[in-house]
Image (spheres, helix red, strand yellow):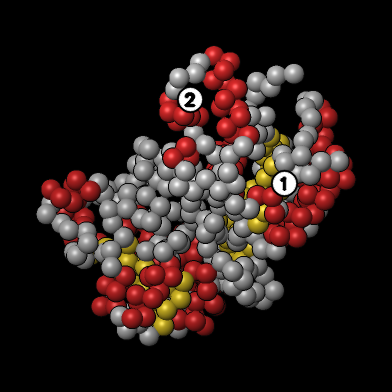
Amino acid sequence: MSNFVGTVSRGIKLPIVKEGDDLAAIVARSVLDAAAGEPFALHDRDVVAITESVVARTQGNYATVDDIAADVRAKLGGEHIGVVFPILSRNRFSVCLKGIAKAAKKVTVLLSYPSDEVGNHLIDIDRLEEAGINPWSDVLTAEEFHETFGTVLHPFTGVDYLDYYAQVIRECGAEPQIVLANKPAAILRYTKRVLACDIHTRQRTCRQLKEAGAEAVCSLSDILNQSIGGRGYNEQYGLLGSNKATETSVKLFPRDCDAFVQRVADLLREGSGKQIEVMVYGDGAFKDPVGQIWELADPVVSPAHTAGLDGTPNEVKLKYLADNDFADLSGEELQAAVRERIAHKKDKLVGDMAAQGTTPRRLTDLIGSLCDLTSGSGDKGTPVVLVQNYFDNYAK
């Protein structure tokens, strides 16, 4: 029988879960019930992906502003703290900033410009050029920025982040100072005790700060990497990947996910007889073409996955085969030749011209991005995604 369907992505609805719920059992039962109720069949190498948010919620992996303040104060002192390269986000950073501000008497925030690390723009780069400002060398105070450009609101949120972050700091009892620069060492003009708040470049930023003479340097991954008072933590990522839970608390990135994904896989195998791959996913790794925002504000797309999701795709380009290797063929003869070529492709196609233009990204990054787009971040109510036929190809 012919197969006319390729990759299928289905959102799976779950009940609202709370701390202490047996999420692995809930996920497995929900997938099995969905398959029986729709109906559709489950297959070997299907992928079940669970958003990190519900994993962390059932773990109770939460921390408070006071927890953040206690750890920041212990590691950077309680005087003047520099905050380097935070992203512009009320959801991702505002509560973290409250904790930092409660730990200090003064906080100097150094913002990258014209945009933050994940593409949230403070100002269009063309306006910088028109004003004769070089973002790679020029250091601007918030006052100088506003004097030149006036009030600049984020196009999606309508927030002036320079004023907003200053207000957050002030309301927590610390003196705020906002500076714009793209070299992390610029913060050392103001203080030598620094918290690097960038995500994917944090190791480089910390190294540069230490080499430039900083007295104490931490990254967000160093804050709440151990529990404070028995509350939430993440030993690998600390505050990275955290989200605002309430005005005074954050939900941290989930921990101990390897055992969780394996248990879900075991339960699905018991219930379906199929070897289904399982992963936890957070932000997808894609860029919005309008807002220029790169979505990956989490430290990784997937903090855990079963072994079958290791590696990258090993694919050939169909149009390359049709236009080059089999340019003299057509119709069923062409279809058969392409299928034969795929069926006998090498295990590693690196350097093979037939693979040019394919996507050599990690499977978990690709599938996690698909899942993030499927589940969304709002009220769809589908924190679990079932991906089927992902590993099929034209030869099957």
* Disc 1: CA contacts within 10 A as few (<14), some (14-19) or many (>=20): many
Q: Residue 331's mark?
A: none
Q: Quadrant of residue 142?
A: bottom left
Q: Residue at position x 42%, y 47% from top?
A: 294
Q: Do the numbered discs 1 and 2 sit on residues whose CB atoms are within 8 Å?
A: no
The kind of residue on which mark 1 rests is Glu
* Position of residue 295 in the picture relative to residue 167 (left or right): right
| Residue 31 seen in the current view | yes
Q: Is residue 128 left or right of residue 316?
A: left
Is residue 288 or residue 309 the one in the foreground? 309
Residue 213 position (above or below residue 123): below
Q: Residue at x 56, y 48 (%)?
A: 348
Residue for point 66% across, 63% down: 255
Q: Which quarter of the figure has residue 339?
A: top right
| Marker disc for residue 326 | 2
Q: Position of residue 241 (x, y in %)?
A: 54, 59
Which image quadrant for residue 214?
Answer: bottom left
* Mark 1, residue position: 277
Q: Is residue 150 above or below residue 109?
A: above
Q: Is residue 64 left or right of residue 216?
A: right
Q: Position of residue 35 (x, y in %)?
A: 79, 31
Q: Residue at x 42, y 79 (%)?
A: 217
- Quadrant for the C terminus, please: top right
Depth check: give the residue in front, 361 or 281.
361
Residue 332 horizontal/vertical position (percent): 58, 15
The three-letter amino acid code for the residue at tag 2 is Phe
